[in-house]
Image: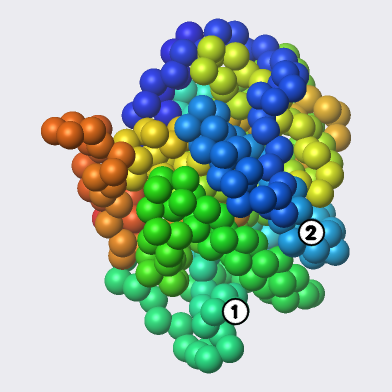
Amino acid sequence: MEFTSFSGAKRTVASDAARRADFDEIPIISLTASKEEILAKLTDACTRIGFFYVKDHGVPQEKVDRMFELAQNFFAQDLSKKNEINYKKSNILRGYEPPAEVRTDETRKPDLNEAFNWGYERSLDPLWSRTDDTEEWQDNPMSGPNAWPNFPDFKETISAYYADVLALARRMIRLFAEVLLLPPNFFDPLVSTPGAMGRMIHYPPQKPSDPNALGIGAHTDIECFTILCQGTVPALQILNVNGDWIEAPPIPGTFVVNIGDMLARWTNDRFISTVHRVWNITGQERYSIPFFFGVNYDATIKTLDSCLDEGQKSKYEPVLAGEYVWKRLSKSRLGPEEVSAAA
Ligand SMILES: O=C(O)CCC(=O)C(=O)O
Ligand SMILES: [Fe+2]
């Protein structure tokens, strides 16, 4: 079987069945280890696997727990209530996505999950909100206001979590800069108002007999990297280099971090953006909270010279971050006519 991701990359898939990851197949990196150890483990994980767990990350468990409680309560509402903020009412795809509408893997049925999506606002960013409470949207297809629901403590709960994960992401991108032998602050000016989107996702249990309808179809992530909080129900699977699906179960106190296509483009695939999917055959409701960290939407992603050998050309054309994210997200969420009308 061959699978083509939205980024155009082709991967071989040996079989639809998944197996448990062997020890060390998805490394666990402690962020309180020595810098030397962190950089060595990150280098290996980013260049060989594209996925790893982080522990000792500094985000308090209470903030995580409150997010999962919020997710359960929010998704328990009637569909009509949730649809008051349907993402099709937002011209930047923010708000509520009902089940079976988004087709992340174009070759299969739409995803079974329902989700709430929100994006960066200065009012959510401690770097800005202490000094400035005006929002200034950048001139690109992804910047703009969120679609917050009328639901108790919604924005407050999300703000508390998002601020900490945003700080963690800015810390991680400094580490990635060092892995790439760049100055640690290389990316800092590019993440002052970053394209940083959060999602709360609910995956209903599904029958194992229909692998064509998945919680979320096979895909690679779009942004630089993802910080995923998995909750307690295992269902995430990643495609290893041999074309085998391996399970990446939740580990208490950790986040899963995976490299996305922006960092793959930046590094000419020295950093690997790995295909993954969610297949929830546990019989339980599953909730997860990914955070997708990209650069400012007006930044250009052009392969770093240090990732090209002398005279080597990049596989990737330079792209404007906001346009790239819009193209990819709208492809799976809007019909082709709506995408060209909105372009
Ligand atoms: O829910 C998960 O475990 C993964 C979600 C995911 O891959 C995504 O939203 O891109
Ligand atoms: Fe993903």
Residue that extends furthest to the left in the rendered view of this protein: 311
Label 2 lies in ligand 1 vicinity (Cβ under 8 Å): no
Of residue 1 and residue 77, the one placed in the foreground of this image is 1
Q: Which residue is mark 2?
A: 64
Please name the residue shown 79% across and 59% down the image. Answer: 64
Residue 257 horizontal/vertical position (percent) = 61, 44
Of residue 88 and residue 244, the one placed in the foreground of this image is 244
Q: Which residue is mark 1?
A: 126
Amino acid type, callout 2 = Val
SS state under label 2: helix
Q: Earlier in the sequence, mark 2 or mark 1?
A: 2
Please name the residue shown 59% across and 47% down the image. Answer: 36
136 is higher (above) or lower (below) than 184: below
Please name the residue shown 63% across and 43% down the image. Answer: 37
**Quadrant assignment, res 270:** top left
User: Which label lies toward us, 2 or 1?
Assistant: 1
